[in-house]
């Protein structure tokens, strides 16, 4: 019998912000961080920060991200958890799934998966193709076929043998949300734990029962909650919040000019000004009104949050002259 991947007693309830240190946080990410903090603190939860550094890491980004959160006054509890230091914990969780017969080796390259997903096939599920789900190519390989691929020196990833097609989660903003579950990767073919596995293991180990993050991850929540069920840990309650977009409707990015805290400070704004801009975008402060996290906490009501993306106009990221203060944006 395998041991459970998380300690028997987990700490008290918590929310979290879990950035990937692949670059600096822009105002959209900072707004998500503020929301995660507000959701956690307004419900008496601990607020944790976790660095999700299993993918590409930009030098110094983790330190700058933590400094940004501190500058905005978004305090967190306990030490920052760093995913790259937790290989043994992920291995233990994967070991349980292997022991339960819930995994298989996959030798597909990205290209093969792309081509299989887009190949015309009478029985192909159009929804699966559109979502670029794994088509199950390696699911039923025979021991001989596996040996042959190994002998060719093809690296293998480990996939979940999912026995459901969909799963339902509860989201504070989206209600009951049902999404597709496919045979997701648990361990990548470079030997590193995959994001979906790490996030589930870590949330459970840290007592995270409230996950607030960008709504680009809503479609991943059902897979993660299903994985939690297989690992015998509770799924969190989710709040997938709208992203920040530029005026062309694309995700906010470097090309949009001064969008990070450091860049805005270079342009003469203070972190308090930036917090005020984020608060205004959330309907929690009038234009130009100074904001502190504690003052925002008093006004915070999840049900009143904007449900549409935040369209960031360059004009929004400035300090308003006194004459323009005191009104909400149009
Ligand atoms: N690390 C992910 C990101 O920065 C967030 C994952 C999560 O919050 O579950 O997009």
Image: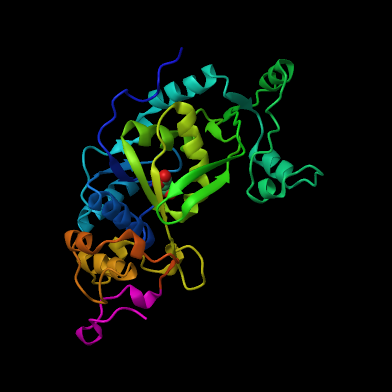
| Residue sitting farthest toward the bottom | 323
> Would residue 83 be seen by someone viewing this image from the given angle?
no
> Would residue 93 be seen by someone viewing this image from the given angle?
yes
Colouring scheme, one of rainbow, by chain, secondary structure, one colour: rainbow
| Residue sitting farthest toward the front | 176
User: In the rendering, at what x and y percent does residue 31 appear?
Assistant: 33, 60
29 up-or-down from 312: above or below:
above
The residue closer to the viewer here, 149 or 178, is 178
Rendering quarter of residue 280: bottom left
The residue closer to the viewer here, 96 or 91, is 96
Chief secondary structure of the magenta portion: loop
Left or right of 320 in this view: 59: right
**Residue 120 on the magenta segment:** no
- At a point 63% along the width and 49% down the height, the residue shown is 131
229 up-or-down from 122: above or below:
above
164 up-or-down from 285: above or below:
above
Q: Which residues are magenta?
A: 313-330
User: In the rendering, at what x and y percent does residue 251 appear?
Assistant: 48, 62
Left or right of 221 in this view: 120: right
User: In the rendering, at what x and y percent does residue 330 appear?
Assistant: 37, 81
Left or right of 125 in this view: 297: left
């Amino acid at each position: 019998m395998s041991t459970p991947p998380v300690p028997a007693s987990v700490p008290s309830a918590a929310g979290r912000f879990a950035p990937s240190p692949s670059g600096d946080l822009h105002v959209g990410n900072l707004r998500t961080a503020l929301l995660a903090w507000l959701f956690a603190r307004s419900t008496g939860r601990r607020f944790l920060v976790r660095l999700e550094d299993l993918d590409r890491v930009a030098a110094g980004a983790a330190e700058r991200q933590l400094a940004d959160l501190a500058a905005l006054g978004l305090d967190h509890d306990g030490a920052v958890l760093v995913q790259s230091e937790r290989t043994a914990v992920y291995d233990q969780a994967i070991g349980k799934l292997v022991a339960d017969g819930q995994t298989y080796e996959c030798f597909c390259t990205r290209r093969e998966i792309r081509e299989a997903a887009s190949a015309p096939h009478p029985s192909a599920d159009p929804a699966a193709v559109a979502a670029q789900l794994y088509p199950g190519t390696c699911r039923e390989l025979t021991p001989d076929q596996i040996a042959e691929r190994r002998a060719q020196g093809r690296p293998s990833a480990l996939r979940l043998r999912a026995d459901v097609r969909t799963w339902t989660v509860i989201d504070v903003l989206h209600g009951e949300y049902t999404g597709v579950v496919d045979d997701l990767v648990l361990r990548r073919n470079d030997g590193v734990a995959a994001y979906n596995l790490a996030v589930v293991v870590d949330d459970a180990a840290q007592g995270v029962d409230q996950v607030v993050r960008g709504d680009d991850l809503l479609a991943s929540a059902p897979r993660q909650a299903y994985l939690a069920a297989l690992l015998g840990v509770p799924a969190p309650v989710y709040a997938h919040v709208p992203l920040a977009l530029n005026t062309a409707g694309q995700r906010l990015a470097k090309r949009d000019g001064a969008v990070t805290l450091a860049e805005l400070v270079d342009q003469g704004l203070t972190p308090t000004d930036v917090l005020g801009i984020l608060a205004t975008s959330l309907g929690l402060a009038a234009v130009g009104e100074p904001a502190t996290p504690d003052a925002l906490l008093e006004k915070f009501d999840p049900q009143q949050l904007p449900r549409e993306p935040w369209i960031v106009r360059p004009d929004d990221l400035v300090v308003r002259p006194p004459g323009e203060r005191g009104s909400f944006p149009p």
